[in-house]
Amino acid sequence: MPANFNGYWKMLSNDNFEEYLKALDVNIAVRKIANLLKPDKEIIQNGDHMIIKTLSTFRNYIMEFDVGKEFEEDLAGVDDRKCM
């Protein structure tokens, strides 16, 4: 079982975030918007099952997965990529 990350998390800083997004080939408009945001995270963990909610003024996003199992993350609305 992974460590317990349950709770509500507030972003304090996002140092070098734009450079990170650039390395991921995220387009410049999305990078500029993302760099201005300070999203909060709510993590709900039940054993190996994780739900991570990203909450911001731009949009909210929910990612759900099981630790140790491959899953597909759909980034439609962000930059229209799918990640494994």
Image: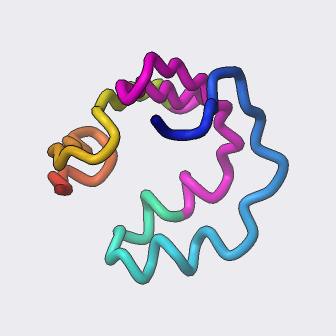
Name the residue furthest front. Answer: 1
Residue 50 in the magenta stretch? The answer is: yes
Q: Position of residue 39 (x, y in %)?
A: 65, 37
Scheme of colours in the image: rainbow
Quadrant occupied by the C terminus: bottom left
Instruction: Give percent across and percent down for residue 36.
Output: 68, 52
> Is residue 56 found left or right of 28 in the rendered image?
right
Residue at (80% x, 56% y) in the render: 13
Front-lying residue, 66 or 25: 66
Q: Is residue 83 magenta?
A: no
Decide if residue 54 is on the left or right side of residue 8.
left
Is 52 left, or right, of 39 in this rendering?
left
Q: Residue at x 71, y 42 (%)?
A: 38
Q: From this viewpoint, which residue is outermost toward the right?
A: 12
The region drawn magenta spans: 32-58
Residue 47 drawn above or below residue 24: above
Q: Residue at x 72, y 60 (%)?
A: 14
Q: Is residue 18 above or below residue 31?
A: below
